[in-house]
Image: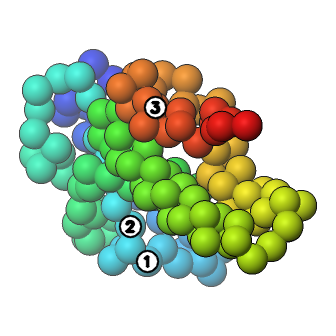
Amino acid sequence: MSNSSFNVLQTTVNLELCKIDDWLRANKLSLNYNKTNFMLLTSLKHNPASFKVIINNHNISPEDNLRYLGLLLDNKLSWKPHAQRVKTQLSRACGILSKLKHYTTLPALKVVYNSLIHPYLNHSILNWGRASNATIQPLTRYWRPRGR
């Protein structure tokens, strides 16, 4: 949802969330207010803490980073937290491959690569289009063939 007016946006968000909460209760579903968060994406200099989201008299807390469908999104959509998380996972997987290469065959290593590394590189790769080169640079070493 977007609006150029901060106050109009806040009012609209709260009204729409009230409708969603009513629909959920009418259909015998519930929303866990303690696990519900929001993230404000804005180029304006408003403090996200001043943006109040309230559902059924429960204050919903703002977050700077949120996990969504396996992605770690930050409020600036910079991809830095997600790239760091992927880098950590890939580094661990490469360590496993490095140790396994002394004990198994190349086809077995390819299976390990396809299960531990390839999914992290491909997951939501189309969404990474706006990530800066500086963000993606640490991950490029996992795409390039080494040696041989």
Q: Is residue 110 left or right of residue 77?
A: right
Verify CB contact (< 8 Å) between mark 1 and mark 2: yes
Q: CA distance from mark 1 to mark 2?
A: 6 Å
Tell me where residue 26 appears, x and y as whole percent: 60, 72
**Furthest-right residue in this view:** 107
Disc 1 marks a residue whose amino acid type is Asn
Disc 3 marks a residue whose amino acid type is Ile
Question: Pointer 2: residues within 10 angstroms few (<14), some, or many (20+)?
Answer: few
**Residue 52 visible at all:** yes
Depth check: give the residue in front, 132 or 56.
132
Q: Which residue is mark 1?
A: 32
The answer to which of marks 2 and 3 sits earlier in the sequence is: 2
Query: What residue is drawn where x is 53% and y is 37%?
Result: 141
Q: Which residue is mark 2?
A: 36
Q: CA distance from mark 1 to mark 3?
A: 35 Å
Quarter in which the N terminus is drawn: top left
Q: Which residue is mark 3?
A: 136
**Residue 19 visible at all:** no
Quarter-of-image position of residue 128: top right
Query: What residue is drawn where x is 48% and y is 22%?
Result: 130
Q: Is residue 110 left or right of residue 10?
A: right
Circle 2: element type: loop
Circle 1: element type: loop
The answer to which of marks 1 and 3 sits earlier in the sequence is: 1
Tell me where residue 19 appears, x and y as whole percent: 48, 55
Q: Nearer the viewer, mark 1 or mark 3?
A: 3
Q: Is residue 133 above or below residue 101?
A: above
Query: What residue is drawn where x is 54% and y is 65%?
Result: 95
Q: Nearer the viewer, mark 2 or mark 3?
A: 3
Disc 2 marks a residue whose amino acid type is Thr
Question: Pointer 1: residues within 10 angstroms few (<14), some, or many (20+)?
Answer: few
